[in-house]
Amino acid sequence: MTEVSQRQWGEVAGLGMVDLWVLRSAQVRVEVLTLGAIIRSVVCGGKDGCMEDVVLGFDSLEGYVSDKRYLGAVVGRVANRIARGRFVLEGKQHQLHINNGPNALHGGLKGFNQAVWLAAAVDGGVRLSLTSPDGDEGYPGEVQVSVTYTLQGETLTAEYQARSTKTTPINLTNHTYFNLAGQGAADIYDHQVTISAQSYLPVDDTSIPTGEVRAVEATPFDLRKPVLIGPRLKEIPGPGFDHNFCLSSPGDTWTERHIARVCHLASGRVLEVSTSQPGVQFYTANFLDGLIAGKGGARYGRHSSFCLETQNWPDAVNQVSSTNTSLASPSPLSDRGH
């Protein structure tokens, strides 16, 4: 049995009131904000019975309003990067707002993470909905989007749906940063990760896929068996993992599958991830710099956490190899993961 409650948490100038929703089962407590559909906290037990919040975030609403790293938020319309912020769709070129070097990232200058969503209780959870107007950040079509969070026992499920008045790219994900050791832990070097992917996407120096789909075999990206994150990070070119792992191939049946497992041996906490999406972006918080003051005044530095962003392949709308491109049209598009 999951208890669901909500209360006002603050107000954002020009956007209105922000509510805090709480989902509570016997084993887990989850907090969700209507700002950005943010997962603010996930409190769960370890092998010693100690309950810890394993999600990075802020003590106050002001922290989330000023946040530039998408802590806990749903990002869109298109998660990840679109090269040069442009794409051609149905013979027309669309130019998006640029906000990440030469590229568009996570929906642009004002993405879904900065909007206040409407919320309504559902059985065991909360459904958040948002309307993105035609031309929002340069994307065509008005889009009706929703995410439904439900908690059953130890399983938190996020189900996304989108419907557009025009054909438009859509790629929704949640950008929660996890550290299974709990608040105040400096890094994730003692976490073990497993990702069930046979291939990954190499990227250029602006983090856009090169077009190659490369086998993980005999590379540092082979995470098919449990790997300790700390030593493996030393083998990765660049500051760390920020790569798409390919969970399915073009033409594969779209079905939910178990794709990742992260274990923190000292606490006994384990995160298991399942999704119907064709990719997962494994990110090791390479661009957190210690300047962010988070919960309890904690300073979130590089490699202080990890994200497993289930989504379509990055820059899919421009990539020949990504025939998995998600396009929302007058028929609905949906995704489910937990």
Image (tube, rainbow, N blue to C red):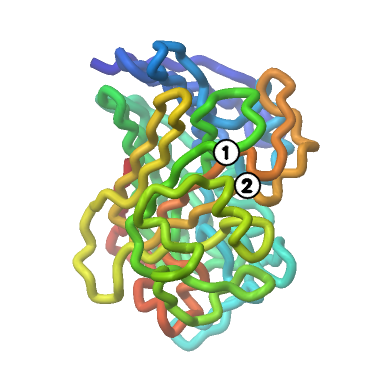
- Which kind of residue does numbered mark 2 sit on? Ala
**Residue at the farthest right position:** 291
- Displayed quadrant of residue 149: top left
Q: Position of residue 316 (x, y in %)?
A: 46, 73
Say which element carries label 2. loop
- Residue drawn at (50%, 63%) of the image: 220
10 shown above or below 84: above
Q: Position of residue 20 (x, y in %)?
A: 51, 22
- Which kind of residue does numbered mark 1 sit on? Ile
Q: Nearer the viewer, residue 268 or 175?
A: 268
258 shown above or below 51: below
Instruction: Report the quarter where the C terminus lies.
Output: top left
- Displayed quadrant of residue 137: bottom right
Name the residue beneath numbered marker 1: 188
Query: Viewer-nearest of labels 2 and 1?
Result: 1
76 shown above or below 34: below
Q: Could you tell me if the residues under marks 2 and 1 are in contact, i.e. CB atoms within 8 Å?
A: yes
Mark-to-mark CA distance, 2 and 1: 10 Å
Q: Residues within 10 Å of mark 1 (few under 14, many from 20)?
A: many
Answer yes or no: is residue 36 visible: no
Q: Position of residue 85 (x, y in %)?
A: 63, 72
* Disc on res. 285: 2
Answer yes or no: is residue 303 visible: yes
- Residue drawn at (62%, 27%) of the image: 185
- Residue drawn at (69%, 44%) of the image: 302
Q: Nearer the viewer, residue 302 or 129?
A: 302
Q: Nearer the viewer, residue 135 or 191?
A: 191
- Residue drawn at (62%, 68%) of the image: 207
Q: Position of residue 25 (x, y in %)?
A: 31, 16
Say which element carries label 1. loop
- Displayed quadrant of residue 332: bottom left
